[in-house]
Image (cartoon, grey):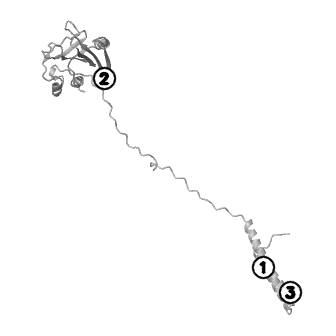
């Protein structure tokens, strides 16, 4: 037996048939007023029940019918952009840096004492102090016979000293030497003039010693500087200077 409630056209036909049956039964009793009212009320109630039953059946049928879930369309992933993201840091172009140039080892040694420094520096260092330029320029105070040591060749030898002074003055010599002779000078330097020190400076080796000249009690400084195969010596007694060696280096090596 089918227990499903009527629906659609079957429901409508059932309601019409029920209505006709009720009306046919009510016709012979038309003269009974109270009975007619009850019948009418019953019909109305039956119609209401039928209508409600149909609505319930319609609702149940709608619930039983599967409803497809709304489809969701997924937006495609954005393709990678070749442009720089707005949040990416903006890096400026690197600042070019200059590579320090190694000091030149090629020396140009003047043969005139007055050309060892610029004219302005000459007045600052020596003023009107009398100049004596040795010719030939060989010999140093460190060599008793006045000759250059083996492997050493003096190119220019200059002395600034007042004839009235006993020891005060400045002596500058410039020359060349073999690598072995230069290394020997550096190795023996700490043992001379009461001791001295050597350090790397200005692209070469800088050595200096200081002491007191007795019995005068004045200071004496001896400086030895070498770069490549060229060397400079400065002996100054009781005559302080400021920047004499850098001025000589600028003239000879072009620093």
Q: Quadrant of residue 151?
A: top left
Residue 2 lies left or right of residue 223; in this view the side is right
Which sits earlier in the primary sequence, circle 2 or circle 1?
Answer: 1
Q: Residues within 10 Å of mark 3 (few under 14, many from 20)?
A: few
Name the image quarter holding the N terminus. Answer: bottom right
Q: Quadrant of residue 41?
A: bottom right
**In the rendering, at what x and y percent does residue 20 appear?**
81, 84
Asked whether residue 13 appears in the rendered view, the answer is no
* Cα distance between the residues tagged 2 and 1: 119 Å
* Cα distance between the residues tagged 2 and 3: 137 Å
Residue 221 lies left or right of residue 43; in this view the side is left
Q: Secondary structure at mark 1?
A: helix
Q: Residues within 10 Å of mark 2 (few under 14, many from 20)?
A: few
Q: Is residue 239 above or below residue 6?
A: above
The circle drawn on residue 25 is: 3
The residue tagged 1 is: 48
The mark closer to the camera, 2 or 1, is 2
Q: Is residue 209 above or below residue 40?
A: above
Name the image quarter holding the C terminus. Answer: top left
């Amino acid at each position: 037996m089918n227990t499903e409630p009527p629906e659609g056209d079957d429901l409508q036909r059932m309601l019409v048939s029920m209505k006709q049956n009720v009306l046919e039964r009510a016709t012979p009793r038309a003269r009974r007023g109270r009975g007619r009212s009850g019948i009418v009320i019953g019909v109305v109630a039956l119609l209401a029940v039928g209508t409600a039953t149909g609505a319930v059946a319609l609702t149940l049928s709608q619930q039983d019918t599967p409803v497809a879930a709304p489809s969701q369309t997924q937006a495609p992933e954005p393709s990678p952009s070749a442009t720089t993201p707005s949040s990416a840091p903006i890096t400026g172009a690197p600042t070019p840096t200059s590579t320090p140039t190694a000091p030149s080892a090629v020396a140009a040694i003047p043969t005139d004492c007055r050309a060892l420094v610029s004219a302005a520096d000459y007045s600052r260092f020596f003023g009107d102090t009398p100049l004596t330029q040795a010719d030939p320029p060989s010999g140093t105070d460190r060599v008793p016979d006045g000759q250059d040591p083996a492997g050493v060749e003096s190119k220019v030898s200059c002395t600034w000293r007042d004839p009235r002074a006993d020891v005060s003055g400045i002596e500058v010599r410039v020359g060349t030497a073999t690598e072995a002779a230069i290394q020997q000078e550096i190795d023996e330097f700490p043992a001379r003039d009461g001791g001295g020190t050597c350090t790397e400076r200005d692209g070469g080796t800088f050595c200096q010693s200081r002491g007191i000249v007795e019995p005068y009690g004045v200071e004496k400084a001896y400086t030895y500087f070498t770069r490549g195969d060229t060397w400079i010596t400065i002996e100054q007694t009781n005559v302080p200077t400021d920047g004499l060696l850098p001025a000589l280096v600028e003239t000879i090596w072009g620093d």
